[in-house]
Image: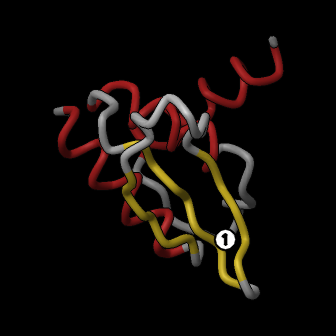
Amino acid sequence: MEPEKTYQYLEELAEQLGISIRYDDFSDPEVPATSGLCKVRGRRFYIMDRSKGLSEKISLLSQCLCRMDLDDVYVLPAIRELLDAARTATHAD
């Protein structure tokens, strides 16, 4: 699957799970920040560093989504494999 399509499916999956993706610039060296999931007033947001490359965005979002309960959600087999690999890598660390 093309990386652009993969990322698009990950974004759509996040939305299905009630996670809004926001893009921000984390290049300010005085304010160290990283991409990640947060909750604000009961809503979940994934804040993504817009300067990251596509492959890193895929990896970051996969690491987040692999922790979610996906039992009742249809996920394309290629995306499920990606999330399973992310889950395995996360547990290996």
Under mark 1, the amino acid is: Asp
Relative horizontal placement of residue 39, taking residue 48 as reference (left or right): right
SS class of the residue under badge 1? Answer: loop
Quick one: quadrant of the C terminus?
top right
Relative horizontal placement of residue 58, taking residue 18 as reference (left or right): left
What is the count of numbered marks? 1
Q: Which residue appears at 55% of the width and 59% of the height?
A: 46
Foreground of the two, 40 or 79:
40
**Vertical placement of residue 76 versus 22, above or below:** above
Q: Which residue appears at 50% of the width and 29% of the height?
A: 29
Question: Mark 1 Cα within 10 Å, few/some/many (few <14, many 20+)?
Answer: few
Q: Which residue is mark 1?
A: 72
Q: Position of residue 62 (x, y in %)?
A: 53, 39
Q: Furthest-front residue in view?
A: 30
Quick one: quadrant of the N terminus?
top left
Q: Position of residue 50 (x, y in %)?
A: 32, 44
Foreground of the two, 55 or 73:
55
Foreground of the two, 30 or 8:
30
Q: Which residue appears at 40% of the width and 34% of the height?
A: 27
Which of the 4 quarters of the picture holds residue 11? bottom left
**Vertical placement of residue 72 versus 57, above or below:** below
Foreground of the two, 46 or 78:
46
